[in-house]
Image (cartoon, helix red, strand yellow):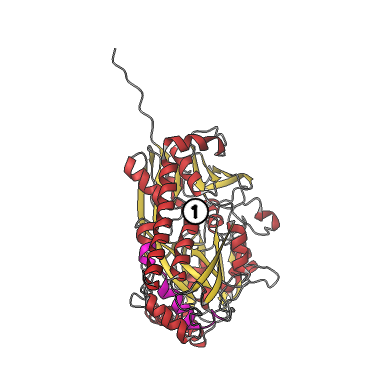
Amino acid sequence: MSAPFAAAASHAANRREIWATHNLRVHLCASLGLCGLFVAACTERPVADPDVLTLAVFASPNNFDPRIGTDEVSQKVYQLVFDTLLTLDDQLRVAPGLATRWEQPDDNTFVVHLRSGVTFHDGRALTANDVAYTFNSLIDPAFVSARRGAYAVLDRVEVVDTDTARFVLKEPSGSFAIQLVLPIIPDGSGAELRTAPIGTGPYRFVSYSVDDFLELAAFEHYHGGRPRNAGVLLKIVPDEIMRGLELKKGTVDLIVNDINPDTVEQFRSDGSKQIIAATGTDYAYVGLNLKDPALSDVRVRQAIGYAIDRDAIVKYLRRGLAQQAVTLVPPSSWAFAADAFQFSHDRARAQALLDEAGYRDPDGAGPLPRLRFTLKVSTNEFYRLQAAVIQQDLRQVGIELDVRSYEFATLSKDVASGNFQMTTLQWVGISDPDMLRRVLHSKQMPPVGFNRGSYRNAEVDRLIDEATAAPDEATRGHLYKQVQHIVAQEAPYISLWYKTNVAVARPGLSGIRLTPLAAFTFLKDVSREPTPPRTSNR
């Protein structure tokens, strides 16, 4: 067999081994025999009230202060404990929240009017002082938060009266309204909020055991009406297989998104659980650190993009519970650039680009690579399998990956500090194209923003600045689409897929409704249907 055919055969065998290992692991863990072996290992915390909903999540929340925490699980907690000043509807447009209405008397001013009768969990009434404190703290130079970059245009927030607050901007910003979709905290809140949150949301904080569980109780005086259940217990189960087993044996009522696609398929096949799916906005990607000398070359980045078989990842690893991603902006957004450049799976093109960049194959069909990189991923089973596929794909074009997996908190810290060459992560809950500014503008480097890969492009900065200031949606959309076209070609991110939201629940739960953002806010409407009495023939 010739060297090229031998290499191709080896690659096919390796790829089959990855899929086979993946499928074997899932099928084994779905079997009753293996479930029996793992029962003792599952952490169980008795719930005294059967009306409490138990959900499994993949990680502990990092911080209960919504001005600080940016990880996915913390965001879900905020949706339960806090209310936002404004909200987003299913079309991702700004809608009333704690503010029933807002107006813009001039280009630099927003005035919001608060809902009456809203109280915090400790009994204090919500006022404009709480709104002013929340937002003014984010623009305080002494306050450290990755969210600060979103409020660089905000000069100050003034209290007009008890129920009215005025936002004064430094310059016009057509995208500012969406920045009002922020949880409101009590006036004067300090460091205690990080460990014991107090909000106005449908659930109040009860207790937290790190890496074990978070207990929330229904807030009896919630302004939107008491939740239809007694509370929510978030059970922290880092291992993906174990989450599925917890659901299988009934110690968990519901899992939203944090479940392996193969496990979803298993539950769908045996009909033992409810499966609810809906189009989502979460964006999976390969992040590249452009401070690395090789990755600073656009030809190398493009070669990586051509090398990855995204279609195989969506079909086989995601089980079709995703669609190939185009840009950071989701297809449901009014600013989505559907015609932006997309990478096809083209090994020959990838190798030609590496040759052009000066990284020629040192030994032809031999084992020596053109380049070596480290790919940091989480310990999540799916992402490790996805990393193995990407590793095989890149090996075929001469790029060797050293895949290293970390607990999510460690990975998140490393990425946020720029301590990586390559990584695979998700942006969760993308709702506005202003996210392009937070992630790609050169003035949004950490700690004030999310440009963790140190991408710099003066034209992209200019277009984003114009889009941010533009007063009308049509102009903003046109500018944001131009940004997406440029970035798709320059590839500081390699787009992988958009997640299809999926909830798997035990029978008897009603009120489950997934939004594009997969927000946990729907949990307040979930209840258990009464169990019918047993009947017998005598």
| Residue 54 at x, y percent in the picture | 50, 41
> 275 or 394: which is nearer to us?
394
Residue 510 in sight: yes
| Residue 26 at x, y percent in the picture | 42, 47
In this view, 265 is above or below 70 = above
| Residue 273 at x, y percent in the picture | 37, 41
Q: Is residue 442 left or right of residue 13?
A: right
Q: Quadrant of the C terminus?
A: top left
View extreme (front): residue: 1
In this view, 462 is above or below 160 = below
Q: Which residue is mark 1?
A: 381
Quarter of the image for residue 188 reads bottom right
Q: Type of residue at label 1? A: Glu
> 376 or 395: which is nearer to us?
395
> 506 or 464: which is nearer to us?
506
Q: Residue at x 35, y 27 (%)?
A: 532
Magenta stretch: includes residue 308? yes
View extreme (left): residue: 537
| Residue 470 at x, y percent in the picture | 45, 82
> 446 or 143: which is nearer to us?
446
The chief SS type of the magenta part is helix
In this view, 97 is above or below 466 = above
View extreme (top): residue: 538
Residue 469 in sight: no
Q: Which residues are magenta?
A: 294-313
Q: Residue at x 42, y 78 (%)?
A: 350
Secondary element at image label 1: helix
In this view, 514 is above or below 493 = above
Q: Quadrant of the N terminus?
A: bottom left
